[in-house]
């Protein structure tokens, strides 16, 4: 029983650290706040358009993709700035690649969202 409690306690602590990371991301990063607003808009639009359960799965996955990319980008930027405060071309390239991951994820979200929402809107017009 003690082993189970210790395991559960460690998992709970890990979950708290992760939740703290999400809060820190939203508080400290302007782009994360933009992602938050976009995520809320996606949710509102999905509810208003009454998208299918399959569409919800794709929308949730797409939004999660952007959040994961943004969190990893922020982590890479913070670590890079900590390791080398001066400008370093290699670190700059790594930071650019991490930012590119967020951009690519955002473009994918737009494509997924359009592929799911435009047919619903077209059906509503006919």
Image (cartoon, grey):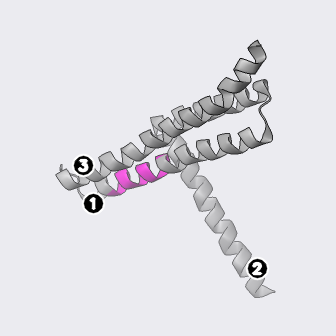
Give the numbered dot on residue 18. Answer: none
Q: How far across and down, in percent of the image, does residue 77 sit?
A: 35, 51
Q: What secondary structure is marked by label 1?
A: helix
Q: Is residue 78 magenta?
A: yes
Front residue (pair 28, 100):
100
Local crowd size for mark 3, using a 10 Å CA cut-off: few (<14), some (14–19), many (≥20) = some
Residue 17 belongs to magenta span? no
**Residue at x-position 76% and y-position 79%:** 5
Residue that numbered label 2 is attached to: 5
Residue 93 horizontal/vertical position (percent): 25, 50
| Element under disc 2 | helix
Q: Is residue 88 visible?
A: no
Secondary structure beneath dot 3 equals helix
C-alpha distance separating marks 2 and 1: 38 Å
Residue range highlighted in magenta: 70-79
Rendering coords of residue 67 (x, y %): 55, 46
> Label 3: which residue?
92
Task: Please give the residue where the numbered disc 1 appears in the rendered image.
Answer: 83
Label 2 crowd bin: few (<14), some (14–19), many (20+), radius 10 Å = few
């Amino acid at each position: 029983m003690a082993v189970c409690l210790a395991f559960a306690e460690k998992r709970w602590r890990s979950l708290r650290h992760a939740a703290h990371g999400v809060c820190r991301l939203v508080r400290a990063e302007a782009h994360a706040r933009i992602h938050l607003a976009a995520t809320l808009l996606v949710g509102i639009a999905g509810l208003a358009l009454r998208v299918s359960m399959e569409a919800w799965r794709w929308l949730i996955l797409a939004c999660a993709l952007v959040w994961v990319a943004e969190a990893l980008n922020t982590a890479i930027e913070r670590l890079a700035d900590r390791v080398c405060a001066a400008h370093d071309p290699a670190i700059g390239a790594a930071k650019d690649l991490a930012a590119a991951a967020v951009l690519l994820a955002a473009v994918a979200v737009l494509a997924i969202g359009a592929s799911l929402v435009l047919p619903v809107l077209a059906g509503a017009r006919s």
